[in-house]
Image (cartoon, coloured by chain):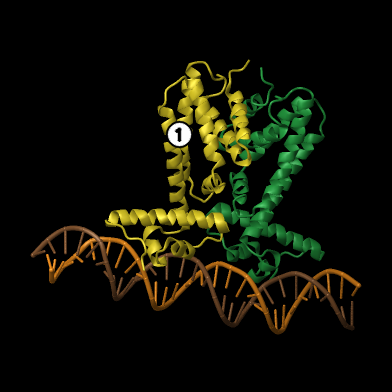
Chain colours: A yellow, B green, C orange, D brown
Amino acid sequence: MPKLWNETIASHRHTVHEAILTATAELVSEHGLLSVTMSQIAERSGIGRATLYKYFPDIEAILRAWHERQIACHLHQLGELRERGGPPGERLQVMLEAYARISSGRFSHDHAVLELAAVLHTGAHVVEAEQQVHDLFKELLTEVAEVGGLRDDVAPDELATYCLHALSAARSLHSESAVRRLVMVTIAGLRPAR
Amino acid sequence: MPKLWNETIASHRHTVHEAILTATAELVSEHGLLSVTMSQIAERSGIGRATLYKYFPDIEAILRAWHERQIACHLHQLGELRERGGPPGERLQVMLEAYARISSGRFSHDHAVLELAAVLHTGAHVVEAEQQVHDLFKELLTEVAEVGGLRDDVAPDELATYCLHALSAARSLHSESAVRRLVMVTIAGLRPAR
DNA sequence: TTTCTAGAATGACAGAGTGTATCGTAAAAT
DNA sequence: ATTTTACGATACACTCTGTCATTCTAGAAA
């Protein structure tokens, strides 16, 4: 029996859609990636197995959708910070700290599965999603460069790549202060050459 | 019929073992991670399916073994560089460039699956393997710190984590010169505060 | 209100993969 | 020569998969 039934069909489908993504994320973090099955996902989502196939063709598609939801969420968080004014140098620091915090993720599978998704033979589609985050950083770094706060011997594009990867180290750090030090070190790499 | 038969049993088992790992890596890079099956691996390895189970209990175990082989290979490469003398500062640069080159991996799945393995619900075992690489860097950084070539407001331990992640950005870069610039930027983050 | 219909949910089915157990054979070790 | 070991093959019960035809319901039309 379908437990979840909202007013309209559209909202119902949306609810089920979300439930599937959440259930999948839970199962992956509980039992690992390779042992997750469509059957388990259907059961945990509270729908019939056959119904699941009306929403997603296979597990890879589900993980892709989940990954996109995560990226969208991160972009939203980072985008809000971008609204706030202030000198580019300060905004850079705020942004880097925010991203580091996101990377360190409440439950560690956040970022892990995120990087993982890039391997799932997905190719272009996933890369495109992460490209948006990359571009956000690239634009901010360009602004910083314009006020002379950035080294000029490396393009903002490459520096953005450097930032994203360096900050992903936050996942391996276990204290709030360590993350702050990581951001400090990362920024030191961006400063103009002496 | 068993195609591969060497002199001794030990060497035979070793040959089969390697063949399994290689076949699995190929299949993963061809068809993605989730669609690889024990049946396919057995066929490509040239052994019977039941025989495969005498070597590995499941796909996850195979990927774990493959991951360990990769790490061992990387450690060997990095270890050789460590033998060579010279001032710690220079050795650091050589080491970082070597690791960046390893990360950028000839065929991209090298590093990708490497990170992926960390998510495969393997937990401690895989982390331990990567810890060795981390320790190698940590020791080298400690030496650099002793001659005053390192910032002293962040522990070598955390700086090693920073290095490994920052250099993993090499995978996203497409030119040799870009990788060199990445190493330069990464090192800039390690220098003593002005 | 009652009827109608698009589409949501489902059970059932055939095909594939899994893990294990057994057996006969051939090569290695003693 | 005899024992030990590893192999391939086969078979089994089980789970997972992908796709039917069918049933049921929400929301619109009469």
Q: Looking at this view, is A20 or C26 the one in front?
A: A20
Badge 1 density bin: few <14, some 14–19, many ≥20, Cα 10 Å: many
Quarter of the picture containing the C terminus of chain B is top right
Q: Give above or below for A96 relative to A89.
A: below
Judging from the image, mark 1 belongs to the subunit labelled A
Q: Looking at this view, is B34 or A90 the one in front?
A: A90
Residue pointed to by mark 1 = A78
Question: Would you say A7 lies left or right of C3 here?
Answer: right
Q: Residue B149, image x and y in percent?
A: 74, 23
Residue at screen point 64% across, 26% down: B189
Residue A80 visible to an observer of this rendering: yes
Quarter of the picture containing the N terminus of chain B is bottom right
Q: Residue D17, image x and y in percent?
A: 47, 65
Residue at screen point 47% across, 52% down: A63
Q: Give above or below for B164 relative to A119.
A: above
Q: Residue B5, image x and y in percent?
A: 75, 65
Identify the image quadrant of residue B45.
bottom right
Q: How many marks?
A: 1
Residue B88 visible to an observer of this rendering: no
Identify the image quadrant of residue B80.
top right
Residue at screen point 62% across, 33% down: A177
For badge 1, the amino acid type reads Leu
Question: Would you say A62 lies left or right of B123 here?
Answer: left
Q: Give above or below for B70 relative to D15.
A: above
Residue at screen point 72% across, 32% down: B156
SS for callout 1: helix
Q: Residue D20, image x and y in percent?
A: 34, 71
